[in-house]
């Protein structure tokens, strides 16, 4: 089972335990219902992803015990060469950026401005605009790099086709 799918079963178990502990400690309905909703949503996403994966029959000699199956489910055991359906290794990996953090800080300060006044909004507009500017510049540079790689790949295939056809 891919790591992307196991994440949701671990989230379900975590939220379920936290909801039970939260109820025991606080007896608060609202928080317990929200945590329970988070656990149900995680279980729903896990089941949707699990249903979309191809199934394979397991020979009787390779069947393992219940504890190993639970370990596979929550991700405590590793399998070499396991297929990762959500991985896309065909493209470029974008470089890290501080732009989302700047934008988030700016939006938070603008939100504080609704409570504390206009000066907080003005102070939040500076990192928000800077974050948007940096992010758009990095995205456009990434698009240019991907287009250049695609053009290079396309011309390489055309050269190979003309050599093979000649």
Image (tube, grey):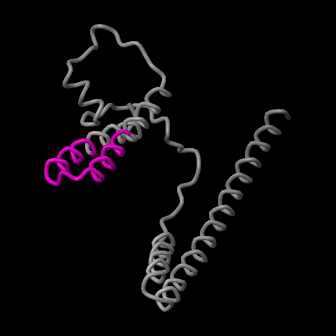
Q: Residue furthest left?
A: 25
Q: Is residue 25 magenta?
A: yes
Check the picture and name the quadrant holding the C terminus. Answer: top right
Identify the residue shown where x is 63% and y is 71%.
136
Q: Nearer the viewer, residue 27 or 70?
A: 27
The span shown in magenta is: 15-40
Q: Nearer the viewer, residue 55 or 152?
A: 55
Q: Which quarter of the figure has residue 59?
A: top left
Q: Nearer the viewer, residue 73 or 128?
A: 128
For residue 80, side relative to residue 126 (left or right): left
For residue 25, side relative to residue 10 (left or right): left
Q: Is residue 90 magenta?
A: no
Q: Is residue 28 above or below residue 108?
A: above
**Looking at the picture, how far across and down is residue 25, in whole percent?**
14, 52
Q: Is residue 109 above or below residue 5?
A: below
Check the picture and name the quadrant holding the N terminus. Answer: top left
**Looking at the picture, how far across and down is residue 19, in whole percent?**
24, 46
Count how many numbered circles sit on residues in the image. 0
Identify the residue shown where x is 46% and y is 32%.
48
Identify the residue shown where x is 72% and y is 53%.
152
Q: Residue furthest right?
A: 166
**Looking at the picture, how far across and down is residue 80, in whole percent?**
34, 32
For residue 92, side relative to residue 37 (left or right): right
Q: Which quarter of the figure has residue 72?
A: top left
Identify the residue shown where x is 84% and y is 33%.
165
Q: Main secondary structure of the magenta part?
A: helix
Q: Residue furthest bottom?
A: 119
């Amino acid at each position: 089972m891919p790591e992307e799918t196991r994440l949701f079963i671990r989230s379900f178990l975590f939220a379920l335990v936290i909801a039970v502990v939260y109820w025991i400690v606080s007896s608060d309905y609202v928080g317990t219902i929200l945590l329970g909703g988070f656990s149900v949503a995680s279980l729903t996403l896990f089941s949707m992803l699990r249903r979309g994966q191809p199934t394979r029959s397991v020979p009787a000699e390779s069947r393992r015990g219940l504890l190993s199956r639970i370990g596979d489910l929550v991700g405590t055991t590793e399998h070499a060469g396991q297929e990762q359906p959500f991985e896309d290794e065909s493209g470029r990996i974008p470089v890290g950026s501080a732009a989302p953090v700047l934008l988030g800080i700016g939006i938070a300060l603008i939100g504080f401005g609704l409570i504390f006044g206009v000066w907080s909004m003005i102070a939040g507009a500076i990192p928000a605009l800077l974050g948007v500017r940096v992010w758009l510049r990095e995205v456009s540079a990434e698009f240019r790099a991907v287009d250049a790689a695609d053009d290079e790949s396309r011309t390489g295939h055309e050269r190979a086709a003309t050599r093979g056809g000649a």
